[in-house]
Image (cartoon, rainbow, N blue to C red):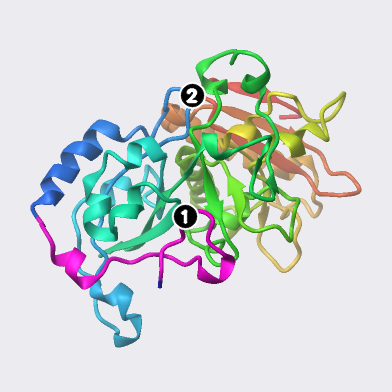
Amino acid sequence: MTQTPSGASASSSRIARPTRTRRARRRASVVAGFVVVAGLVAFVRPAGTIAASPAFGRTSRAVTTAATGSVPVPFPGLDSLRGVSRKLRARFLAPQRAAAVPVLREYFGDSAATRAGVYAADDSAGAFHFITMRPFADKVKGRIGSYRIGFFPAEHRGARSASYRNPEGFLEVTANNADTPISEHFRLRDFLTKDQGTVWPKYLVLREPLIDKLELVLSELQQTGVAASRLRVMSGFRTPQYNAQGVGAGGRVQDSRHQYGDAADVYVVSGARDWMTDLNRDGRVDTGDARVLAAAAARVEQRHPELVGGIGVYPATGAHGPFVHIDVRGTRARWGPL
């Protein structure tokens, strides 16, 4: 497979894996990589930016020739990047930070730190992906290529706080890498803006703490006996141009956290129907079930205050069932019929 470079066609955009030569080269650089990672990882609450959590990894022979059934070679470092939930399978690297991680070049080539792509690593716990972003400056006149993004609030006026600054960059999602697992239960495509269906590549802003929190919420439901096999993301990242279409009374807010990659509207799906599950087992699906989900998110925040954020309950309409907004904005917020 080849790397997923920015500007590549969908047919050539695949997940990069290091060659045998690069895998064997300068294993001593792992130690240096640990030092760099320790200085750059900003997983829990980056100062108003996308969490850029650079790291390193050695792709085992089993990744390159999976058909042989080889056992992945354990590689130090990846386990510490799997989040509080221990279920993360990806880290996102902003361009300027990726350039400061020499291990990327050692194992994936010189272009890995400067070109957007998905780079696969492995350890005894399974596959892991480092995803390098397109820089924010690649957005020209509200677009990257044919994909419409629009303008973030801070481009029109000063950011009202650090958490509302422009993102550092964009994940480039192609038809070939859209199903890349970023955690045990979520893939890149789950968080894409729900428009421009035929346009590829698409661009995504996403923060790892949100994914970690959603995994913890799902585990919390399961551990308390609630029938919950998966969370469906009804709305993840919203490009500013898409978000603006719904701004107004009773609709979206102009500074929606969805634009910053740290918010998702979710509901529990346990059967064939794409609808909220009867979580409280009262024989109907309504806001009572959304409250069960919201309460689980609140308990996660109590145990992990570094993941504090907004929790809002929304009732069903003719277009969708009840759902819960969950985010990791860094301050506590509550709304709706909780």
Residue 152: % across, % down: 65, 28
Q: Which residue is mark 1?
A: 182
Quick check: 34 left or right of 272? left
Say whether residue 10 is left or right of residue 106.
right
Q: Is residue 297 above or below residue 279?
A: above
Mark 2, secondary structure of its residue: loop
**Nearer-the-camera pick, 220 or 185:** 185
Q: From the image, give the main secondary structure of the stretch colored magenta.
A: loop
Q: Amino acid at mark 1?
A: Ile
Label annotation for residue 48: 2
Identity of the residue furthest to the bottom in this view? 68
Residue in the picture at 81% in, 52% down? 284
Dividing the picture into quadrants, the one containing residue 41 is top left
Residue visible at 37% across and 35% down in the picture = 96
Q: Amino acid at mark 2?
A: Gly
Looking at the rendering, the stretch of residues picked out in magenta corresponds to 2-27
Q: Is residue 298 above or below residue 77?
A: above
For image coordinates 53% across by 35% down, the residue present is 136
> If the image is split into quadrants, where does the N terminus sit?
bottom left
**Residue 235 image point, x, y percent:** 69, 45
Q: Quadrant of residue 51?
A: top left
Residue farthest toward the right in the current orientation of the protein = 318
Q: Is residue 125 visible?
A: no
Front residue of 129/219: it is: 129
* Quarter of the picture holding the C terminus: top right
Mark nearer the N terminus (1 vs 2): 2
Q: Position of residue 160 (x, y in %)?
A: 60, 13
Q: From where the camera sits, is residue 241 visible?
A: yes
